[in-house]
Image (cartoon, grey):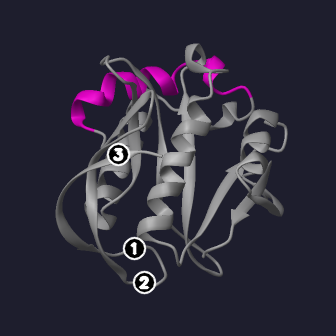
Amino acid sequence: MGTFLSRTPKTCCSAAGWRTTVRPVVEPDEIRTERLVLSRPQPTDADAFIALHNTPEAYPHDGWLRRTPEQALEQLDRFREKWAADGIGYWTIRLAGTAEVIGFGGVQHHDEDDGPELNVYYRFFPTAWGRGYATEMVEAALGWARRHRPDRTVRIVTDPANTASVRLAEKLGFTRYLERQRDGHPEVVFRLAAR
């Protein structure tokens, strides 16, 4: 699990559709795992974010989601807005002991048709693949979720052909919940029930 470095408590709420109240949490400035530092995205992370989202190899299953530099910056701004609104969001992922950004990911509030959930997301530079970093990051995200939002279902949405993400979800106890099409592309939704 991770070590939480925190600030002051903050009341947050989820946006979009559902009128949910999120009880106050101590928002982490960063979470440290054995090998990773997970921190709130900053404007200084923009170059790494643009580079990741313009790396074709980082999209082997969902190339249709690739972004122009402008779209990537808009998405990074949305990540930062979610932090401001909800007190948690997707992190910048660095190797511990270095300043090297190896990806972005984490957990953020998401309103699904049947209620509020926490969505797990991650995207790593291909040079970081195959080393267990995604599992380590998701375990830290789940640790945060179980401590601060135990009432929320956690989900992972991925392309069914993305066998690495499917294996990760199954390994961490997620169950296959739904298969659907989004913008004409298949995706599978995995869920981990609230406690």
Asked which quadrant contains residue 192, the reply is bottom right
| Nearest to N terminus: mark 2 or mark 1 | 1
Q: Which of 6 and 89 is in front in this view?
A: 6
| Nearest to N terminus: mark 3 or mark 1 | 3
Q: Identify residue type, mark 1.
A: Ser
The secondary structure that dominates the magenta segment is helix
Question: Which residue occupies 42% across, 35% down?
Answer: 72
Q: Which of marks 3 and 2 is in front?
A: 3
Q: Quadrant where the C terminus lies?
A: bottom right
Question: Which residue occupies 55% across, 40% down?
Answer: 122
Residue bounds of the magenta highlight: 42-60
Judge left or right: residue 140 versus residue 31: right
Q: Which of 69 and 161 is in front in this view?
A: 161
Q: Identify residue type, mark 2.
A: Thr
Check residue 3 in the rendering and tell me which mark sits there, or answer none: 3
**How many other residues sit within 10 Å of disc 2, few (<14), some (14-19) or many (≥20)?**
some
Q: Which of 45 and 70 is in front in this view?
A: 45
Do the residues under discs 2 and 1 have CB atoms within 8 angstroms?
A: yes
| Nearest to N terminus: mark 3 or mark 2 | 3
Asked which quadrant contains residue 162, the reply is top right
Check residue 14 in the rendering and tell me which mark sits there, or answer none: 1
**How many other residues sit within 10 Å of disc 3, few (<14), some (14-19) or many (≥20)?**
some
Q: Give the SS element for disc 3.
A: strand
Residue 109 seen in the figure: no
Q: Give the SS element for disc 2.
A: loop
Judge left or right: residue 154 versus residue 70: right
Alpha carbon of mark 3 to alpha carbon of mark 2: how far?
Answer: 28 Å
Check residue 20 in the rendering and tell me which mark sits there, or answer none: 2
